[in-house]
């Protein structure tokens, strides 16, 4: 059986379903091929469930420190089964919402394994899609004018660590824990590892982070990585950086995993009830039929131009499977650009310096543009404005004055090169920085915008003024 479509999307994650809806709005007849559930990793195994747990950890931490606000709270307890139930309910609600959006847009969904075919009786061009189903159901062949590959990614493994889903886990398995462990070793001090370290330590779990680099959050501004590490250490997280794990030392006992770590200073054995691997993600491009096309792929990701076309011009690819910033909102925007290009809408390429990225740890981190080090390395003559939240009245009211905002400006053109926020609500505040970058605002223009008082957002004005050492309260 074969069916014709204007567009077939391989993968119903955030990038894929958003692209499908935009294509439907543009008058295309669209189908999605999804192996599991609409919403993909972000909804079911990533952004939504993990941030739900982080919000619970934040509330628990706030309750434990409520005496600062003059509130006497009896000893709070964590009921992890109820925490997990709330997480599952949120995911279920949002999943139903995505299904409703797809139905309303008139998009057909095929649940099965999609594979690209080469030229055949169905089409003289590669790109027809064969759908394999569980069981004995006959394959369906979809014949599209365009294909969008949005197959996402899965967690990386680490040599020597056999992931059993119980004692050695990826975040996929950790999200399904029935009870909290007493202790966890997190291997990887990137965004995912730090978010989990923050969440677990706030839920009274003993946490050790093992990172091969000299610092955590290596791609962030150095002021940010230092501030986050300092805050987590203060709450009890232990860090072993510049670390090499001796693979032959890994042992799994009845209730414990232990292994030896070598640093420049020492060799030590670490042990915990569970090990959580947070060492990046790899693109899902195996066994989807790329060999039947002219598509190029290297270093594990699909190669495209800046409008997400592959070397087969009618086949596009977006999201984690093309590398770059592995963020849900990036995949969504890439998908919109791709389908608008198919429809000859002349979309503009995505500017990576305007993309906000966030870390939902405590403290939170929000970033747009270059770090100070990147600006120097790119040859810019820069000036920097940096203001602590101690200068902001609302931060004192909220009982949280840790953190800062940092603005990096090109001294020659006055262009804003980067904005970094570390502190309470940084992941919300960064949206204003993203808008400033889109409108090509200068620090002077930001300093002239009027913000309400008291508000955390006043830090934008103070930091912009600080670029010229004119801050009022900083």
Image (cartoon, rainbow, N blue to C red):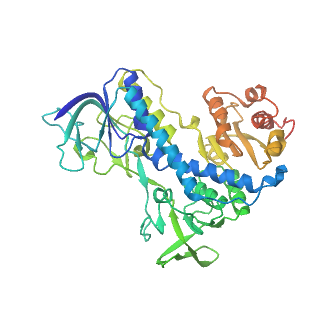
Question: Which residue ends up furthest to the right in the rendered image?
Answer: 472
**Left or right: residue 71 compared with residue 227:** right
Q: Is residue 419 above or below residue 81?
A: above
Front-most of 340 and 154? Answer: 154
Percent x, y of residue 144: 25, 30
Q: Does the rendering let one see residue 362?
A: no
Q: Quadrant of residue 371?
A: top right
- The residue under the point 49% across, 40% down is 93
Q: Is residue 406 above or below residue 213?
A: above
- The residue under the point 65% across, 40% down is 380
Front-most of 185 and 391? Answer: 185
Percent x, y of residue 348: 48, 26
Front-most of 413 and 305? Answer: 305
Q: Quadrant of residue 434?
A: top right
- The residue under the point 58% across, 34% down is 354
- The residue under the point 87% across, 35% down is 472
Percent x, y of residue 65: 77, 55
Quadrant for the C terminus in the image: top right
């Amino acid at each position: 059986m074969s069916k014709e479509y204007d567009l077939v999307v391989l993968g119903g994650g955030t990038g894929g379903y958003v692209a499908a809806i935009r294509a439907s709005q543009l008058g295309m007849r669209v189908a999605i091929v999804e192996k599991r559930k609409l919403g993909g990793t972000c909804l079911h195994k990533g952004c939504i469930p993990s941030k739900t747990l982080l919000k619970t950890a934040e509330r628990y931490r706030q309750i434990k420190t409520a005496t600062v606000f003059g509130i006497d709270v009896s000893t709070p307890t964590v009921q992890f089964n109820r925490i997990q139930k709330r997480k599952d309910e949120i995911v279920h609600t949002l999943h139903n919402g995505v299904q409703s959006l797809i139905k309303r847009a008139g998009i057909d969904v095929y649940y099965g394994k999609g594979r690209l075919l080469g030229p055949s009786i169905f089409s003289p061009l590669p790109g027809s899609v064969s759908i394999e189903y569980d069981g004995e159901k006959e394959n369906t062949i979809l014949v599209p004018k365009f294909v969008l590959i949005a197959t996402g990614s899965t967690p990386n493994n680490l040599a020597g660590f056999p992931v059993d889903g119980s004692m050695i886990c990826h975040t996929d398995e950790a999200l399904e824990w029935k009870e909290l462990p007493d202790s966890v070793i997190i291997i990887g001090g990137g965004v995912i590892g730090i978010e989990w370290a923050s969440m677990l330590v706030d839920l009274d779990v003993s946490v050790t982070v093992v990172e091969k680099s000299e610092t955590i959050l290596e791609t962030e501004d150095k002021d940010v990585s230092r501030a986050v590490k300092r805050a987590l250490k203060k709450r009890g997280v232990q860090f072993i950086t510049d670390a090499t794990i001796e693979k032959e030392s890994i042992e799994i006992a009845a209730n414990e995993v232990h292994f030896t770590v070598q640093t420049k200073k020492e060799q030590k054995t670490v042990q915990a009830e569970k090990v959580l691997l947070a060492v990046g993600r790899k693109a899902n491009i195996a066994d989807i039929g790329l060999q039947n096309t002219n598509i190029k792929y290297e270093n594990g990701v699909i190669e495209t131009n800046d409008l997400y076309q592959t070397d087969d011009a009618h086949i596009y690819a977006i999201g984690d499977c093309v590398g770059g910033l592995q963020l849900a909102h990036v995949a969504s925007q890439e998908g919109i650009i791709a389908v608008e290009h198919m429809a000859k809408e002349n979309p503009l390429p995505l500017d990576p310096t305007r993309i906000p990225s966030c870390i939902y740890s405590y403290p939170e981190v929000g970033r747009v543009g270059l770090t100070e080090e990147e600006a120097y390395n790119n040859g810019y003559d820069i000036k920097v404005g940096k203001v602590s939240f101690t200068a902001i009245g609302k931060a004192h009211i909220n009982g949280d004055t840790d953190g800062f905002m940092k603005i990096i400006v090109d001294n020659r053109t006055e262009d804003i090169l980067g904005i970094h926020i570390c502190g309470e609500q940084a992941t919300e505040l960064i949206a204003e920085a993203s808008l400033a970058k889109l409108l090509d605002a200068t620090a002077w223009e930001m300093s002239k915008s009027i913000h309400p008082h008291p508000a955390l957002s006043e830090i934008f004005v103070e930091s912009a003024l600080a670029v010229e050492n004119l801050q009022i309260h900083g």
